[in-house]
Every structure is written in C-alpha cells, then in structure tokens.
Image (spheres, rainbow, N blue to C red):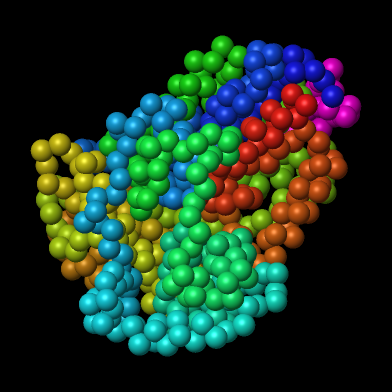
Amino acid sequence: MAGAGAARDVVVLGGGISGLTLAYFLRQALPKAAADATRIRVLDASSESGGWVRTARREGFLFEEGPRGFRPSRNGAEMLRLVEQLQLQSKMQAVDPAAQARYILRDGRVEKVPGSLLEMARWPLTLAVARAALRELFVKPGTLEDESVYNWTTRRFSPVVAERLLDPMASGIFGGDIRKLSMRACFPMLMDLEREHGSVVKSMLLGGAGGQDTLLDGTKKSDFVKKHEKSVSVSFADGMSTLMDALADRVTADPMADLLLNTKVTRLAVHGHNNGSTKGPSFVVESKDPMSGEIREPIKASHVFSTIPACYLAPAVKDSAPGLAEALDEIKFVDMGMVHVGYNEKVLSTEGFGYLIPTAEHEKVLGVVFDSNTFPVQNAEGKMQTRLSVMSGGAHFREVASLPEGELERNALDALKRHLGITRKPDYVRAMALTNGIPQYHVGFGQTLQRIEKQAARSAPGLFLGGNSFYGIGLADCVTQSKQLALKFAKSVSS
C-alpha cells in the first residue's frame, strides 16, 4: 500500500449531489499528508453542476427542476450536518406546518389522508385499512429474502392497502410498478420491522428505537441537527440550488480540485493494477464536449469514483470491463415528466403538501405538489402566488419522454381542472422530461448489486460506485453514501 503522502489522481464522474459531496468529503476525510498529495477532478456532462438538483427562476416564479427538498430524519442527519458545515443554516427552511397534510386521488376526487382520529372516522377507506392493520398483527413474518412491494403489502395487509396507499407512494418516490419494485431495496425499514418484531403495526404501537446520537464520522449530532431532523422536509429560501452552489464553490476554491463541465465520459479504460500502489495510473478517462463533439484530453487517474447513472457508466466500461458493464445493464431506469404551473394569485383552495394518484385511477399524471403551500417563502416577494408541480411518467407511462411539451402541458392542466377545479389560464407553464430520471430497484436488486460490486472489485479495482443507482435514490441516501465512500477511502490511505 502506498504511503499517505504518495501522489494520487482522483477522478469523480458526475457533478450532481453525489459527486460534489464526494469531492467535499474526500478532502475533509483524508489525512493532511494524503490530502495535500491528492488531486481531485470532478467531471460533468452538463454546462452547470448540480445534476437533477436545480432551481429555476423564470417570469417571477421559482420552481425546482428536480428534488424540491430533502428528508432530514434518519440518514438525513448527514445532510443537516452538511448544511452546518457550509454555513447555510440561516437559509434553510422547513416545510410550512400548514402544508403537512397529504392527499390521494380516489374515484377522481382528491381526499385527505387522515391526520387525526376524527379525520380517520370520516375517511371512506378507514374500515378497510383498520381491518388490514388488525389482520397484520397476526400474520407470520415472511421467509423470502425479497419480494415485490405489492406481494409484501398484500401478504401482510391487503390489496386495498397495496393499491390505494403503497402504490401512489411508490409511484411518487420511484416512478415504479409495485408489482416489480423490491420491498427490500425500496422500503427496507418496513421489512426490518417485520423481521425484528413480527409485525409492523406492533412495532409502531410499541414505538421504535431512538435514533443514533452520532454521525458517520463519529461526531455527536449538534443541537441544529437534533432540532431539524424531526422536520418532514426541508429546503432553502432560494431553492435547492443554494446547496449545490455552495458545494460547487467549495470544490472550485480548492487549489487541488477542478470542476470540469461540458465533459461527458465516453470511455473508462482500466489498465494494469498494482495492488493499491499509486506508482502509475490505473485508469484513463476519455471524454468529449457533448455539444460540440470536441474530444477532451484523456485524464489519467489512480482512483475513480463514479456517481453517474449505471446506464451511462455501463457503455463507458464495456471495452475494459465487459462483465461489469453487463451487470450494470441489469439496472433499468424510467423517464419522468414534470410540468410547472404558476399563477399570480391564489387559485388553490386546498391546504397541504399535494396529492398522489394510484395506478388504479388510470390517470396520465402521478401526482401534484403544492409548491406555494410547502415553501411559501419561495413565492415572489409581495405577490400572492400559486405554484404547482405536476409529475408524470414512470413505469406506467413510459412514453412521457417522447411526448411534445405541449401535450405534457395539456395533460397537466386537464388534471388540475378535473381534480382541483382550476380553470384559470396559468401565468406560467413549462414542461420538461427527465430521461433516465429514476433507477428501478426491482425484485432481486440485492443480488444485482452484489454482482456489480463483485465485477467492479475483480475487473476495475480502484473504481468506487456511488450515486442513486445503487444504495438509495433520495438525496440523503446519496449524500450518506458519498460520505461513507470518502471515509472508507481515507481509511485505506492511512492504514
């Protein structure tokens, strides 16, 4: 093993949340001698960093083109700590308390998911859900290592709970089909509760164990982290780009780091490895400008951290590591559509976060987020605005990426008219499609991941895998994985 002070050339593929936090955490985690001798280059195909996390301001409206916030509970504590480290506490905003109510569409009508016993008594699905919850107390734990979200939910609860509650949730988060999505990969906590307590309902009645008081690096949670990890969701007054801009500034301010934009990886050549020695490069990264087609100068690297989607990494390693490429190709992706609709007046009579739509409703949209309710601080100053984000696409509407923007907009406005009674012409509307937007963690994903890790270790040692293709699709999952990789790498360097 090379010494801590040996020169290293590290390349990070992808300049989104995973790539930028990786570069940031690497510099923090490495011992000083190793940090001073390690050059970090972050490559991204886009003209600006941030990946899917991007805030847009157009015609007086603020909208998120990707995630509109992050969940601060559980591993979200790592993101809260990052907010502290970047000194963004004063800019962070929790979801407005009045907007925490959730809704679902049932028989074409938007219905509130009960938040109290009184509301539960009035909810049409209460009897079916109560029966399913009572039944779940007496269902024996399953013996399968993995099963679909649909099979697990119907086995423990009922088809009604699966189709009316878990289905819209899975569509909203993963854009997926609950008959194909892996319960172990998508909702591991619920499977763990079943295994540990014999019943999910029983575990919830008893109350779960308290959260960890320390972070991944062993430091204690600050008062700031403890206070905000109880929030439902958080963002920033000026949108999620606040976080991405701060990360990019930290990376570019580092004299031993570079952020190379308009640089699309075309080939990752794996050369002779020497058991961890850094005497020579293990990789050559070939790339080009995706707009002009100009070939970039090849970059030699001792270690590569890939945070780009598996579907883009696979063709890059096909020549040098065909077994790895084949395993990566097992992960499928879905395209997502997003339509932002803005009004310079209050046209939404419903309070709350938004509503999700079960597949059984046979709609062309997955749900609607009430952005102006969730983060009213993001509304234009001095104006009464309504901002809505209409989601579509996913496993049940695969043609979304090929539809003209005008059709996506019409579908969205039609849904708002039928579901919410909004007939007024919007002051702003914009549609976009996110190609290969969300990886699909299908049943057996754990075995797929093992094959990928095995192939990477065998044919491309020195290649580390991160991003949302492997270990969770949420922002908190991505940041946590980046921190884990950085700590693991730093430990290997100093040992």
Q: Return the x and y of residue 259 as percentages of the image width and height.
A: 55, 22
Which residue is pictured at 29% across the width and 41% down the height? 93
Say which quadrant the N terminus sits in. Answer: top right
Quadrant the C terminus occupies:
top right
Q: Residue 354: give x, y in percent of width and height.
A: 30, 61
Relative height, residue 171 to residue 138 (above, below): above
Q: Nearer the viewer, residue 406 or 306?
A: 306
Left or right relative to 263: residue 393: left
Is 280 rendered above or below residue 161? above
Residue 383, placed above or below residue 270? below
Nearer to the camera, 304 or 101: 101
Q: Give the range drawn in magenta.
A: 267-284
In the rendered view, tell whether residue 83 sits above or below residue 113. above
Specify whether residue 270 is painted magenta. Answer: yes
Image spot of residue 216 (x, y percent) = 58, 39
Which residue sits at x=49%, y=75%?
A: 202
